[in-house]
Amino acid sequence: MIGKKRVGLVSIAAVITSFLFFASTASAGDSDYEERRARGVAVLGSLTGVKDARQMAAKLEAENGALGSFALDFVLGDIWSRPGLSKRDRNLIVLTMLATLHQTNQLKYYVPGGLNHGLTVVEIREIMTHVAAYAGFPRALDAMAETNRILTELGHRPQNGKLPGAEKYSNAERRQRGVDVMAKLSGNPASDPEKVITAMAGKLGPLGAYGIDFAFGEVWARSQLSRRDRSLLVVSVLTALGRTKELHIHVPAAIRHGVTKEELEELMLTAFAYAGAPLAVEGMHVVQELP
């Protein structure tokens, strides 16, 4: 019993030590308290659209105590204020993680923040659409419902009260689109779509075909988000779910889609705040394996 407990403590210590190493090399948290609080209040204002967010910050701290202090000073003042990732991209990452973790209550801050930080209404809704393929339809539908409610309150009700449905493609079109997406994602172009299916079927059975036709041929191939944005999104989902094996596929794919290693490191730092240190450390290890 003592041995098991000691191993558990060592594992936790290793996780914390690893993350602190990565965080320190990225020069995180090197400012004093007043600067961090000022930056945090400024980010809170940009998220909410409130010109002077000091009163809102005081209310957050009064209602949550030390947790509120850390949300202001660390999450917003440290992480959100770092220069390695645009606020637009960080907002995309946070929206993705909130939907993945089914934290729809927090969307009331980050949907308006997305608009204030440069995401379009179409892009915000598309985030929820893409999440379905990687975190499941129930979470994506719940997140979309809350997103639509917030956007409607902000004056972005769909035209005629209806959102457009998905584009309609034949099975052959879906297959070819999926293979084209996979070629760029994997870095291994294939001239024959059926060879790709055959190669995947040996390991995944019918899941391989549906993965190519739906996840890649329909979701990934949509134009409402760039491939770079979709890579940021998928790495965010996989990090929040702790799917390290899949990260070994999608982290290099993100590089091929134009995401930089520094931006991926920032994604993992953001995950520290929104999904927890252990998951962020696992993801950071994968990123650090990049050349």
Image (cartoon, grey):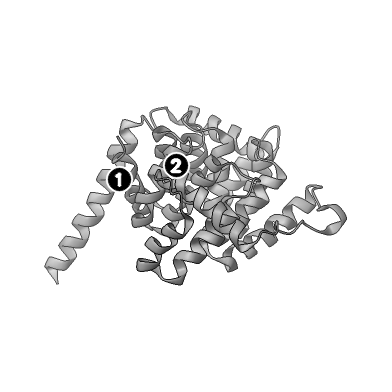
Residue 73 visible in this rendered orientation of the protein: yes
Query: What whole-number distance in Å separates the C-alpha atoms at marks 1 and 2?
Result: 15 Å
> Which residue is disc 2 drawn over?
254
Secondary structure, mark 1, is helix
Instruction: Name which residue lies at 52% across and 40% down.
Output: 228
Amino acid type, callout 2: Ala
Q: Nearer the viewer, residue 208 or 57?
A: 208
Instruction: Name which residue lies at 74% across and 57% down.
Output: 149
In front: label 1 or label 2: 2
Crowd around label 2: few <14 · some 14–19 · many ≥20 (10 Å): many
Residue 48 x %, y %: 67, 41
Amino acid type, callout 1: His
- Asked if residue 3 is positioned above or below residue 86 in the image, the reply reads below
Q: Which of 140 and 199 is in front in this view?
A: 199
> Which residue is disc 1 drawn over?
285
Q: Which of 42 and 261 is in front in this view?
A: 261
Secondary structure, mark 2, is helix
Instruction: Name which residue lies at 42% across and 44% down.
Output: 253
User: Seen in the image, is 9 located left or right of residue 116?
Assistant: left
- Asked if residue 9 is positioned above or below residue 46 in the image, the reply reads below
Residue 45 x %, y %: 65, 36
User: Seen in the image, is 152 located left or right of residue 271?
Assistant: right
Q: Which mark is residue 120?
A: none
User: Seen in the image, is 43 located left or right of residue 212?
Assistant: right
Residue 102 visible in this rendered orientation of the protein: no
Residue 19 x %, y %: 31, 44
Residue 201 x %, y %: 40, 67
**Extreme residue toward the left, this view:** 3
Q: Earlier in the sequence, mark 1 or mark 2?
A: 2
- Asked if residue 52 is positioned above or below residue 138 in the image, the reply reads above
Q: Nearer the viewer, residue 121 or 175?
A: 175
